[in-house]
Amino acid sequence: MKEKQEYIILTPTSKPGNRQLVELERKLLSDPKEVENIDHIGAGIHEGIIVCNYSNNQDLTEGTYELPEYTTDFHLMLFDKVNMVGKEEIRRMHFYFASDMEEAEYSDYVRSFIELLLVEFPKDYAHYFKRMIKLMQKRFTKLRKILVDIATTRLITDQSSESDQHINSVEESVSIDTVKEALEHAFPNSLKEDDIADLFNCSVEVVRLYLTELMSRGLIAQLENCQWIRVNRLAEFRESNVYTLGNIGNRRVVSTKLSAVGQTRSAMISSGSITTRLLGGFPEIEHVFIVGVGGRVTGYSEKGKMANLGDVVVASSTNDESPFSYIVCHSLQRNRESNAVECYGVKTWQQHDNIISKITTQIKNACTENSVPWDKFFKEGLDYLESNENEGYKFERPTAQNEYCNSGGESVPQIYMGPVAASRVLFKHEVLKDDFAERFGLVAFDAGFDSVVESIFGNRISSWTLIRGIADDSDGTKGKDWQPHAALQAAALMKAIITKLPIFIAVLFLFQFCLIDFNSLTSHQCQLLILANFNDFPTDFSG
């Protein structure tokens, strides 16, 4: 008797209305001709695949087929560039598993399948189902059957009107405020008109109109070769790295703003080189604070483990199981058979001097239900910002649902200590974020400062940390409403920590510098925050 071979059989069938059902089933066959109504039998690299002709098989209509063991769906908008028409779809997938698979494994197994299916979205139905078949054949061998239910919810026949709406929406997204914000984020670097136009996908004429208006307000200046830069109204500078000197308590401080953040190559080179040059220019620096905003880690069900919006996170190692303070995940390693993520490719850093962590713990222990030790500094900063031009940004606490309140109904910020992480890879695969956070005991994510931390290590600075005000559920770059308040909370806590740093001899404080890097807020906001946290600030702001 001929030995049986495994085949994946694709069978399309119709359903009422604008719907289509496609069945992918795994079967052991002695001869592929045992299957009826065959249209094609795969050979070569496609061996083991059978495609059947269209069938109006009533056994596959809704309510008559086998009850699925797991179901998921997603919404799509598709456009046919040749015929200039489009449609919206809902694709619902019903999964059936091998008998030896535990029910608790279903969810993760399906998530991994969907991830690989949509890593690069297939350009048409043929490639979509081909990829599904190949995944069933090679990696997801415990999938017994998949039913794909495709429902068309809306047809788009006037492609020109859709295109016009898209163009109009792009034009509407460009405003004088967005152009100003782009220059703020680039500061102290300049931007060309063409680069700004490309950034917002609009014409150079529109950008030039906004730039001229901003220049008339004294907010920006034009350089050579159509270059534009934000005017530094609080400081005069003589070199490409802008910094500000001042005092916090009895400690001498130098602060700077990074011109770019994130894990793109240009951002890493820019932020890393700025930090290296500044540390080289101030060799007496002993403590480094990287202050800004971040995103909270979701997924903790236990009360008190997950930070709320407006809370503050201080990067530190918590125990032997979580010995790292900052972690960057740059790759994933999967099991070839199950496709499950076996390990993460990471780069890690930890502080060799834990003086900042000890002081933070003391401040955390001094917090009560009604007040926190850095609230005085927060209010001082808030008063300063409200009495000076802050370009329309609101630093008061926004309202939020399900946030922690004391017995008097007031929102009181909390301190969380633990590892902070960054990763472009994890944010592409949202389902892996919770697992990564649990494995490493994370308390927050940020936009990526590995080049800055690497520069700190290269300059032999042993006392450093990241202080992150929680602004969203991402990496801190999405929560525009919460960014100003969260950054001010982080700056206030930074001041509380710095004022408690020990001074061992009378002269040491003259050379005891702290470097503070602010991210996500505009450069003008950053300088205002720094000034709000300085005592006896000198009248000469030159760097």
Image (cartoon, grey):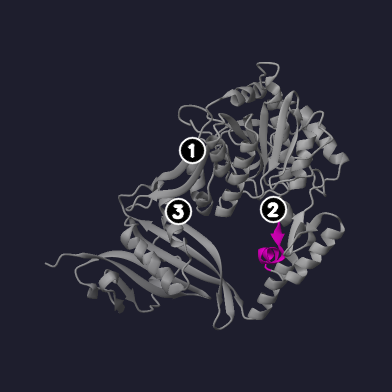
Which segment did they paint magenta?
189-201
Q: Nearer the viewer, mark 1 or mark 2?
A: 2
| Residue 72 percent across, percent down from the top left | 48, 58
Q: What residue sits 73% from the left and 29% below the top?
A: 406
Q: Residue most toward the top? A: 505
Q: Is residue 336 above or below residue 347?
A: below
Left or right: 2 as drawn, with respect to 356: left
Q: Residue most toward the bottom? A: 83
Q: Which residue is mark 2?
A: 189
Q: Nearer the viewer, mark 2 or mark 3?
A: 2
Tell which of 331 and 301 is nearer to you.
Answer: 331
State the mark number for residue 103. none
Q: Which residue is mark 3?
A: 111
Quarter of the C terminus within the rendering? top right
State the mark number for residue 348. 1
Tell which of 514 and 413 is nearer to you.
Answer: 514
Q: What residue sits 50% from the left and 73% below the top?
A: 19
Tell which of 88 and 42 is nearer to you.
Answer: 42
Which residue type does callout 1 highlight? Thr
Q: Earlier in the sequence, mark 1 or mark 3?
A: 3
Q: Earlier in the sequence, mark 2 or mark 3?
A: 3
Q: Is residue 181 above or below residue 401?
A: below
Could you classify mark 3 by the number of other residues whose Cα lies within 10 Å: few (under 14), some (14-19), or many (20 or more)? Answer: some
Q: Earlier in the sequence, mark 1 or mark 2?
A: 2
Q: CA distance from mark 2 to mark 3?
A: 42 Å
Q: Quadrant of residue 63?
A: bottom left
